[in-house]
Amino acid sequence: MRVGQGGTGPGPHTPDGSAVELYELTHAHGEDELINAAIDPGSSILELGCGTGRITRPLVAFGHHVVAVDESAEMIARVTGTETIRATIGDLRLERRFDVVLMMSFLINVADDAERLRLLRTCAHHVRPGGAVFVQQEIPGTRHAPATVEREHSTMVISEVEDLPDGVQAATLTHTVDGRSWSQRILTKNLSEVALEAQLAEAGLRRTGYLTPDKMWVRAQSV
């Protein structure tokens, strides 16, 4: 497990503590439709951190050509119907460019600044000129404890929230689905617009807008 992070519960877990079987049970909640509406039909998409393919599958069904990337062998083995690559995002360097590079699941909120820059440089390397990079980020100030989020057949409880130096926050997320539970300790860091602009620029990207009014979905292009 990575320093400060880990997970418990049934089945295998990734290095950051994500539970593979939990991801397998999780479905899209409108993210696929949001992305599809923002891009051209039949786009080539590089999806970074695809997990078990909850967004991959609907994007393929919409007619897009998706290359799905994840570092977890257990996660990527569950993605079917499209090309898959097992790789650490920061190390990925394909000799291909894509219409869209997609990095979801708040990967941009990794607590380590150097690792975040590596992720963004991977995005910049793989987007074609004039293409788009979509990044999903946490909305600052939205994680408080105790808090419970209810969805059909599932519950997420946020607990043990701890504010650490340099804007880093730790928290425990406990998911229960149909009576099965998984807990994950996470470390995240929210970025101000100024800080995000600076890191995008350092990676060779520039922000061109947002897909949603809450600014959770950032759109960027190569410089």
Image: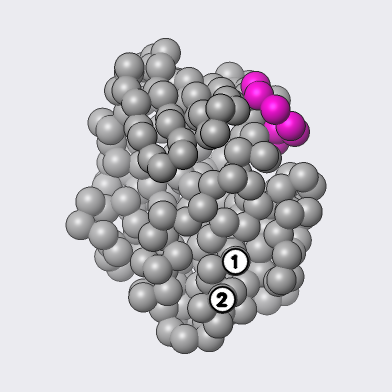
* Residue annotated with mark 2: 61
For the residues labelled 2 and 1, the Cα–Cα distance comes to 6 Å
Magenta run includes residue 191: no
Q: Quadrant of the N terminus?
A: top right
**Amino acid type indicated by mark 2:** Ala
Relative depth, front residue between 138 and 36: 36
* Residue annotated with mark 1: 57
- Do callouts 2 and 1 mark residues in contact (Cβ within 8 Å)? yes
**Amino acid type indicated by mark 1:** Arg
Residue lying furthest left in this view? 213
- Left or right: residue 186 compared with residue 206: right
Looking at the image, which residue is at 61% across and 78% down? 65
Q: Is residue 46 above or below residue 180?
A: below
The magenta segment: 8-15
Looking at the image, which residue is at 58% across and 19% down? 4
User: Secondary structure beneath disc 2?
Assistant: helix
Residue 9 location in percent, x, y?
66, 24
Relative depth, front residue between 204 and 172: 172
- What main secondary structure does the magenta stretch of the protein show? loop
